Amino acid sequence: MPDEDTTLADLRQRVAEFVAARDWRQFHVPKNLSMSIAIEAAELMEHFQWLTHEQAAAALQDEAKRAAVTDELADVLIYGLSLANVLGVDVSTVVLNKLEQNERRFPVEAWRGRARV
């Protein structure tokens, strides 16, 4: 289902059902989930390690490599949604709040086109 047809609530529910069906709630504590996010993020980074920007862009044109990258991204997102479920966090609220904080921290007029101080 594409993003246009799936809500964040739908995804959270599907992740919760997946976890519940396997009786994994007992393992899904914030420590374990946050570590899993970091591990999966590292696996995502491995696909780009030592590549130049050009090589990374070229790698993503390869269907198998792109699929491997998107699988790792999905793992990061699934663990993130699992953590949100465990913490009882409203993802939309915290993301929008963080974006507002970042807008104040990085005003467009001072940061447009810049990545560092």
Image (cartoon, helix red, strand yellow):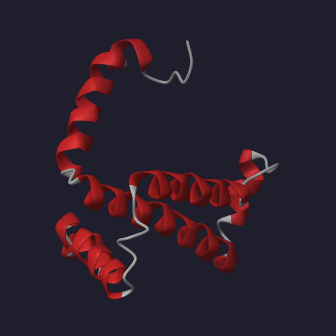
At which x and y percent is residue 105? 34, 17
At which x and y percent is residue 20? 30, 81
Q: Is residue 49 left or right of residue 76?
A: right
Give above or below for 52 relative to 75.
Answer: above
Give above or below for 98 relative to 12.
Answer: above
Q: Is residue 106 left or right of residue 74?
A: left
At which x and y percent is residue 66? 62, 71
Q: Is residue 39 left or right of residue 87?
A: right
Quadrant of image for the C terminus? top right
Give above or below for 91 relative to 25.
Answer: above
Question: Looking at this view, is 70 or 82 the one in front?
Answer: 82
Identified at 38% across, 70% down, the residue is 26
Figure quadrant of residue 103 = top left
In the rendered image, the residue lying farthest to the bottom is 21
Identified at 36% across, 82% down, the residue is 23
Quadrant of image for the N terminus? bottom left
Identified at 66% across, 60% down, the residue is 43
In the rendered image, the residue lying farthest to the right is 50
Identified at 61% across, 67% down, the residue is 69
Question: Looking at this view, is 99 or 86 the one in front?
Answer: 86
Question: Looking at this view, is 101 or 29 the one in front?
Answer: 29
Figure quadrant of residue 108 = top left
Q: How many marks?
A: 0
